[in-house]
Amino acid sequence: MIEYETVPAVCRHFDVCGGCTEQDVPPARYAAAKRAALVEALAHAGYPDAPIAPLLLIPMGTRRRVDFAAMRVAGAVRLGFHAARSRDVVDITECPLARPEIAALIGPLRELLGKLAGFRKTGSVLINAIDTGLDVSVVLDGEATAADRSWLVAFARAHGLARISLGDEPVLVVHAITLDVGGLTVAPPPGAFLQPTREGEAAIRAAVIAGLPGRLTRKSRIVELYAGIGTLTGAIAAHARVHAVEGSKPACAVLEAGARLAGLSGKITVETRDLARRPVTAKEFADAAGIVLDPPFDGAGPQMRAIIEAKIPRVIYVSCNPEALAREAKWLRQAGYEVLAASPIDQFAGSVHLEAVVVFALA
Ligand SMILES: C[S@@+](CC[C@H](N)C(=O)[O-])C[C@H]1O[C@@H](n2cnc3c(N)ncnc32)[C@H](O)[C@@H]1O
C-alpha cells in the first residue's frame, strides 16, 4: 500500500517493466530513501554516526551500459527488460534511463533480431557506449548462420556502430575500440563491465582518490581488488604504485595493454586471480599503504578475512549493494576500523539500487 503522493513516471513502460520501480517516488523522498540505504547499512555494521555525504543524484538519460533481454513469442520479437520477479520480457519502445543514442536503437534492434535464424526463443543485446560509438554484443540461443552475420554487419554499418559482436566474438569492428577510464585509454572486450554511467564512474573515482592515505610516496603500493578493465587503476597510479587484481582474463589483458600504452607498466602490475577461490593473503598485502576493493554484487566474501588479518591502515570499499556492504563493514568495525568518509552515488537512477564508496581507516 503506497502511503505517499506519487509523481507521474517519465517512462510509458513504468509499472510493467521491472527496470525502474521508483520513478513515481517524489524527488525529495527518493533522494532521502537512497541515502538512508547507506545510513542503515553502516548503522547495521556498527557505525551509527558515520560521516555520510549528501546523495549524488545522476539524472535519467545517462545510462551508457544497457543489457536488453529478448524473447520470440509466436514469431514476434519482444525486446526490453524482464517484468518484476519474472522471466517474461516487457517489449519496450522507449527507455528514458538510457543514453538517447542507445534508446534510439531499440526499434532497429527488434527488427534485426526478427531476421536472425539463430535467435530462436531467448537472447539478449548488451550495449556499451564507448568513446568511438556504440559497442553492441548480441547473444543468441541458436547457431548464427552466414546470413545472420551479414545482417549484423549491415546493421553495424547502417547505424554507425563502433563494433558488433556475437557474444564475445567480434563480427565487425567499424571504429577503433577505445575508452578513456581516467588516466588510461583501454579497449574493452565485447560486453565488458563498465560502470553504468560516466557521471557515476567519475564520482566513484573522485571518492576513491580522496580516500587514499595522505602521505603516499613513489614507493607506496596500493592493492586494488576487482579492478576490471582499470576504471580506477590509472587514477590511483597517479598517486602510488598499484597492484591490480581481477578475475577476468580479457579484462586483465585490456588493463595491462592500457597501462603499457600510458607508459605506466612500471607503476601498474596486473594479476589474473579468482579472489573467491584464491584470495590475496594477509602476507601478500603486507607492505601495502591501502586496499581498494570494488567487489561484485554479493561482496568480497572469502577475500574479507585476509583484508582484516592484514590490518592495512586504509581500506576503500566501493559497493553496489548496501546489504553486502553492511555485512562486510561489520567485520572491518570488529577489526578496529573507523569510517572516514562515505559517499552515496545514485548510479542506478529510478531503481532501489545504490552505489557507495566508503573509506575505512584503522583507528
Ligand atoms: C563491480 S565490478 C568492478 C570493476 C572495476 N573496478 C570497475 O569499476 O569497472 C566487479 C569486478 O569483479 C570481477 N570479479 C567478479 N568475481 C571475481 C572473482 N571471484 N575474482 C576476481 N574478480 C572477480 C568482475 O570481473 C568485475 O570486473
Image (tube, rainbow, N blue to C red):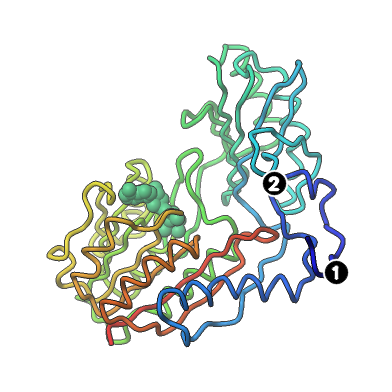
- Please tell me which residue lies in front, 328 or 20: 328
**Which numbered dot is residue 363?**
none
Q: Quadrant of the N terminus?
A: bottom right
Q: Residue furthest front?
A: 1
Residue at 23% x, 54% y: name it: 279
Q: Quadrant of the C terminus?
A: bottom left
**Which numbered dot is residue 5?**
1
User: Is the C-beta of the residue carrying label 1 under 8 Å from the nearest atom of ligand 1?
Assistant: no
Instruction: Tell me the distance, in whole angstroms, between the alpha carbons under discs 1 and 2.
Output: 21 Å
Say which element carries label 1: loop
Q: Residues within 10 Å of mark 1 (few under 14, many from 20)?
A: few
Nearer the observer: mark 1 or 2; the answer is 1
At label 1, the amino acid type is Glu
| Residue 257 can be seen in this image | no
Labels 1 and 2: the sequence-earlier one: 1
At label 2, the amino acid type is Gly
| Residue 307 can be seen in this image | yes
Q: Position of residue 265 (x, y in %)?
A: 26, 58
User: Is the C-beta of the residue carrying label 2 under 8 Å from the nearest atom of ligand 1?
Assistant: no
Q: Position of residue 235 (x, y in %)?
A: 40, 68
Q: Residue furthest left?
A: 283
- Please tell me which residue lies in front, 142 or 134: 142
Which residue lies under the disc numbered 2?
Answer: 18
Q: Position of residue 351 (x, y in %)?
A: 66, 58
Q: Residues within 10 Å of mark 2 (few under 14, many from 20)?
A: some
- Please tell me which residue lies in front, 81 or 3: 3
Give the number of marks.
2
Q: Position of residue 312 (x, y in %)?
A: 23, 75
Residue at 68% x, 73% y: name it: 31
